[in-house]
Amino acid sequence: MTAHCGNNPYLLLTPGPLTTSRTVKEVMLADWCTWDKDYNAMVQSVRKKLVSIAVKDPEQEQNFTAVLMQGSGTFAVESVVGTVMPADGKLLIVENGAYGKRLKQIANVLKINNAVLECDETQAPDPQAVSDILDQDPEITHVAVVHCETTSGILNPIEHIAQVVKNHNKTLIVDAMSSFGGTELYVDQLQIDYMISSANKCIQGVPGFAFVIAAKKKLQRCKGQARSLSLDLYSQWAEMEVHSGKWRFTSPTHVVHAFHQALLELEQEGGVPARNRRYANNQRVLAAGMNKLGFQTMIDPDIQSPCITSFYYPSNFNFQKFYEGLKAHGFIIYPGKISKCDSFRVGTIGEVYEQDIHRFLKAVACVMNQANR
């Protein structure tokens, strides 16, 4: 069993939670009080840094805000859907994977009127199909789409979808859970009204909260609309604004501290463009190496994200034995999530570098050789 980043027994080749740096882990050794002014100042710093990452033109930063929300990424998605949708609104969900399906499940549980554009799990949605639905259904007020669908590893064409949505004057919600911080994506350029991500993804923090980058003018209209007390996005924002970084309910203080450190490390790396280059290189090396070992990638390279890659099972393949073999070598991967075929997934984000991918490929070769004996 190998070690990585301190005392970690495994390298997590997953789309989050993921392998974090030693320094991110170390800052969680300190305890923080939720009422302390230094802690709340840290929260405000985190919020400001998130907006600066999400906005291309610094002059546009004043038009956006960041809201932190306790819980996993799904908590933040539900807080957005449950807060921003008016009683008479209708949501169009663009769905080509499990997280699009989860958006529909959230809307149904909250009894929000919705329509779904269902697409193949291994194909990118057609922006023209989005346009056609919006032309045919004037009741639709909001559109929700997943940017990087980690079901497969597809990077959906958010630029074209955003243009269609704005041409129809609709509110745009983007689940950027597995792409924000690792892919250049700017809310001001694409006129995204609500963009959602999580602490334990490409920023390389740990699980415990998620966040929303919101257009201030849109969010200010949502007072009193929330269908939940704890997931009221507007009230959470108002509390942080009025009380300078204070959360309404107990916040994950250690996680916030770790995330603040992770943001500093993102800056030290060279920001999102530099991190994207590292992740994209990881993915290219992985795909090429796995292909040489007889594994076929599922997604077309033109729409493949740098986050996670899906591979078809080869013939006579036992995933559980493969998984356990890699775990014994110090690597954790993900099972497949595509419904129509057998596959598994390997993540390339987090504190992971090209040399780690080469080590992983050697482990794959070893495990496969043992399986074929």
Image: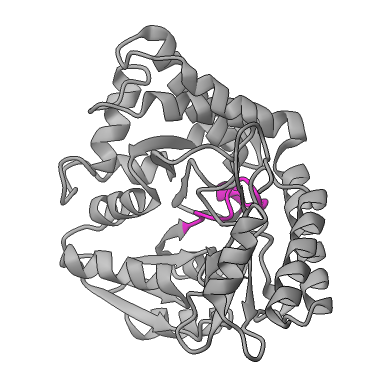
Residue occupying the point 50% across, 44% down: 200
The magenta span reads 175-189
Q: Position of residue 112 (x, y in %)?
A: 20, 67
Residue ranking furthest to the front: 373
Which quadrant holds the C terminus? Answer: bottom right
Q: Position of residue 128 (x, y in %)?
A: 54, 83
Residue 110 in view (yes/no):
yes
Residue occupying the point 42% across, 84% down: 118
Residue occupying the point 56% across, 22% down: 26
Q: Position of residue 12 (x, y in %)?
A: 59, 51
**Residue 297's quadrant in the figure?**
bottom right
Q: Is residue 16 a member of the stretch shown in magenta?
A: no
**Nearer to us in this view, 91 or 176:** 176
Residue ranking furthest to the top: 37
**Vertical arrangement, residue 341 with respect to residue 290, above or below:** below
**Vertical arrangement, residue 94 with respect to residue 240, above or below:** below
Residue 157 in view (yes/no):
no
Q: Is residue 269 left or right of residue 76?
A: right
**Nearer to us in this view, 45 or 136:** 45
Q: Is residue 311 left or right of residue 338?
A: right
Residue occupying the point 27% across, 69% down: 105
**Vertical arrangement, residue 304 with respect to residue 358, above or below:** below
Identify the coloring: one colour
**Nearer to us in this view, 276 or 90:** 276
Q: Main secondary structure of the magenta part?
A: loop
Q: Position of residue 123 (x, y in %)?
A: 58, 83
